[in-house]
Amino acid sequence: MSGEFYSTYCNYLGRYMFQGAMEGLLLEAYEKLPHYLDDSEVQAANILDVHTRAFREVMGIRQDSDNVQWIYIVRATEFLAQILVVIDTFFLQLKERAERDHLTGLYNRLALYRLLPRMLKRAQEQEKPLVVAMLDLDDFKRINDQHGHQAGDEVLRFVAGVIKRSLRNDDLAVRFGGEEFVIVLPATDFTKAKIPLERIRAQIVAERMLPVGEGLTVSIGVAGYTGQGPVELNELIRQADEAMYRAKELGKNRVVFAQGDIGG
């Protein structure tokens, strides 16, 4: 923990304890203290250690009756609780930025491997089906080569927007890497999944956003979990990926389903 953070924390802690538990002082501390931290230091144990050392130092400045000291202890504890709230918020913001794809605003692969296991566990507990779809832009290298990477970025943002607008609140959309996207549909079987996935495919085809009016197409592979029995995250993704490559082999611009659900 940096010396600047410690000295600043001591200053605000002392003022909060001895000058009265003022809300304005807390707001000032909220604003200033995070600037002295990096993400490796944002841990409750580190903050608690700083608080303990700072409290001893601050209390050594003022020696009064036990009753008065107890007031200071209560205020100091309150100060720590409030600061930990804002530190936790700061940490969550860092985590959110780390799990977002900066180009499309969708979740990235890191988030997928955190969130999908939870969704699979919920599906298993509730015995409800779940679908994982792998979407890949067709001939994306040609787009970059002929129209430039800026046009390619616009295409990726456009596809991400179509996906987001087509999904429910509980669904998950992820930029898996490059021109690949993963879509997770909880409480959904193959029959129900076909509707939003075909809608996504059709909307992308309909929008001729490339120069000279060229069409943009995607191939989508779909794997499913029945909601019963064991399930492996990587196996679901592998099956969806294989189904997507079959869609490519069959001529692209289509949705292809894996041969049966996992589980059951």
Image (tube, rainbow, N blue to C red):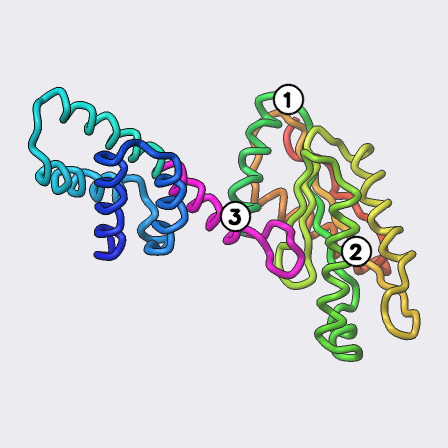
Residue stretch rendered in magenta on the structure: 84-109
Name the kind of residue labelled 1 in the image.
Answer: Glu
Say which amino acid is labelled 2: Ser
Question: Which image quarter holds the C terminus?
Answer: top right
Q: CA–CA distance between discs 1 and 3?
A: 30 Å
Mark 2 / mark 3, whichever is N-terminal: 3
Q: Secondary structure at mark 3?
A: helix
Instruction: Give the percent coordinates (x, y) of residue 56.
Output: 12, 38
**Is 220 rendered above or below residue 117?**
below
Residue at far front of view: 19
Residues 180 and 15: in front is 15
The residue that label 2 is drawn on is 219
> Which numbered disc, 1 or 3, marks the residue that appears first in the sequence?
3
Residue occupying the point 75% across, 49% down: 221
Q: Is residue 254 magenta?
A: no
The answer to whether residue 104 is magenta is yes
Mark 2 closeness class: few <14, some 14–19, many ≥20 residues within 10 Å: many
Q: Quadrant of residue 123?
A: top right
- Residue 185 screen position, x and y as percent: 70, 37
Tell me where residue 76 sits by quadrant.
Answer: top left
Element under label 2?
A: strand
Examine the rendered structure and indicate whether residue 22 appears above or below residue 111.
Answer: above
Q: Residue at x 68, y 32 (%)?
A: 186
Image vertical order of residue 156 relative to residue 238, above or below = below
Label 1, on which residue?
127
Q: Residues within 10 Å of mark 1 (few under 14, many from 20)?
A: some
- Choose top left, top right, bottom left or bottom right for residue 218: bottom right
Looking at this view, is 180 or 124 the one in front? Answer: 180
Between residues 240 and 62, which one lies in front from this camera angle? 62
Secondary structure that dominates the magenta span: helix
Identify the mark at residue 96; answer none if there is no mark: 3
